[in-house]
């Protein structure tokens, strides 16, 4: 048997037990990191124990929505759960993307419980040189 000493975790478990599985009114948030790497933004979400088929990624205009569901493992009738700390249910995260990102070219990878999205910076947002014209480059228009 396993022993725990965190009383707050036990209160959380009790609240979840009283409301029952699947009765939460809002999805829980998932942990994430976001950073720029070269010419793209990278967003990584922690989703341990979630199958790739249970992940849904949507982009509408500049709103990115990631939803995932961790389902309970089927248990036999003779199994008595001693400890259950892994949260179940729907997890969701919404991120407003800047207009400078190319939402048409988002790439998603899922490996070892981490969903990684790579969002390229749009060409129009990248720094560029502007040529300066001088007097010799101007043409006169005769009317």
Image (cartoon, rainbow, N blue to C red):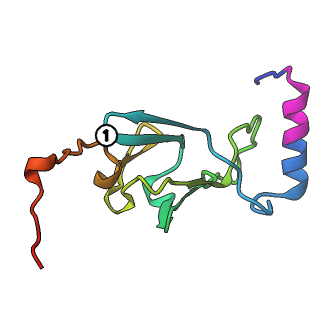
Is 29 inside the magenta-drawn segment?
Answer: no
The relative height of residue 109 versus residue 65 in the rendered view (above or below) is above
Q: Position of residue 3 (x, y in %)?
A: 81, 21
Residue at the spot 36% in from the left edge and 57% down from the top edge: 102
Q: Position of residue 30 (x, y in %)?
A: 63, 44
Q: As drawn, is 133 to the left or to the right of 69? A: left
Would you say residue 9 sits in the magenta stretch? yes
**Residue 74 versus residue 123: which sits nearer the camera?**
123
Q: What quarter of the picture does the N terminus occupy?
A: top right
Q: Is residue 34 above or below residue 1?
A: below
Viewer-side residue, 2 vs 23: 23
For label 1, the residue is: 39
Q: Is residue 122 left or right of residue 68?
A: left
Which residue is at a point 88% across and 34% down the rendered structure image? 10
Q: Nearer the viewer, residue 77 or 37?
A: 37
What element does badge 1 sit on?
Answer: loop
| Residue lying at the far front of the rendered structure | 143
Q: Give me the residue at 88% from left, 57% from top.
A: 19
The residue positioned 76% from the left and 35% from the top of the image is 83
- The span picked out in magenta is 5-12
The image shows residue 104 at horizontal and vertical percentages of 34, 63
Q: Quadrant of residue 96?
A: bottom right
Q: Is residue 15 left or right of residue 72?
A: right
**Residue 11: percent from left, percent from top:** 91, 37
Q: Nearer the viewer, residue 10 or 119?
A: 119
Q: What is the residue that sits farthest to the bottom in this orientation?
A: 143
């Amino acid at each position: 048997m396993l022993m725990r000493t965190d009383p707050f975790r036990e209160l959380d478990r009790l609240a979840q037990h009283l409301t029952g599985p699947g009765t939460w009114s809002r999805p829980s948030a998932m942990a994430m990191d976001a950073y720029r790497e070269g010419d793209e933004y990278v967003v990584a979400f922690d989703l341990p124990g979630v199958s790739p088929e249970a992940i849904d990624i949507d982009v509408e205009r500049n709103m990115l929505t990631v939803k995932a569901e961790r389902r309970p493992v089927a248990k036999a009738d003779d199994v008595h759960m001693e400890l259950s700390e892994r949260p179940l249910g729907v997890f969701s995260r919404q991120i407003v993307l800047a207009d400078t990102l190319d939402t048409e070219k988002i790439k998603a990878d899922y490996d070892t419980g981490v969903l990684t999205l790579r969002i390229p910076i749009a060409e129009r947002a990248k720094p560029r040189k502007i040529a300066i014209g001088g007097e010799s480059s101007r043409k006169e228009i005769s009317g």
